[in-house]
Image (cartoon, helix red, strand yellow):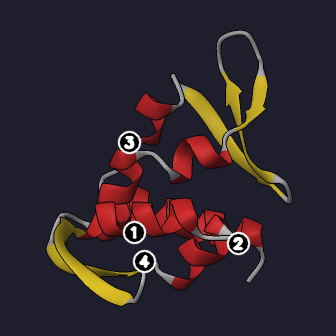
Amino acid sequence: MTDKETLERAIQKAIASGWNRVGLTDEGEMHFTDGGIVVDWLRGGRDFVATETIIFNHDFAKALWGEEEVTTAWELKDGGERILNALLTAYKHHLMQMVVADDPIKYLGENI
């Protein structure tokens, strides 16, 4: 799946789950390019690539992954390995993983 297809699929799923893209984009229209999501504002006709603005948005993440509680584990190395467990909402877990991922779009595609 291409980045463009991943973004389209994620946004369609978020909208179907109640995400209001209009509020995020200041009444703009969204369209997809190979470089990401472009938001075309109705007022002023300006464009900007908005991929990170959208995929790291908390409301977008809530619509994709929900607020169910999940246990998240981390491995830390400081003289040995240990695992820390934390109870997080699903959307926060996925946002954290996307932020540290080498390819956030790939992570998104694998987890929607």
Residue 17 visible somewhere in the drawing: no
Q: Residues within 10 Å of mark 1 (few under 14, many from 20)?
A: many
Name the image quarter holding residue 68. bottom left
Q: What percent of the width, then of the height, locates residue 88?
A: 19, 67
Q: Nearer the viewer, mark 4 or mark 3?
A: 4
Q: Amino acid at mark 2?
A: Glu
- Between disc 2 and disc 3, whose residue precedes? 2
| Horizontal arrangement in the rendering, residue 79 relative to residue 66 (left or right) | right
Outermost residue toward the bottom in this view: 81
Residue type at mark 3: give it: Asn
Using the image, determine if residue 30 lies above or below residue 48: below
Q: What residue would you read off at disc 4? A: 78
Q: Nearer the viewer, mark 4 or mark 2?
A: 4
Write down the residue under mark 1: 94
Q: Does residue 76 show up?
A: yes
Name the residue carrying label 3: 20
Using the image, tell me which numbered label, if any, was put on residue 106: none
Q: Which of label 4 and label 1 is nearer to you?
A: 4
Contact, CB < 8 Å: mark 4 with mark 3?
Answer: no
Q: What's under tag 1, amino acid-wise?
A: His
The alpha-carbon separation of the residues under discs 4 and 3 comes to: 43 Å
Instruction: Return the residue found at the far top.
Output: 44
Q: Nearer the viewer, residue 46 or 111?
A: 111
Comparing labels 1 and 2, the label whose residue is closer to the camera: 1
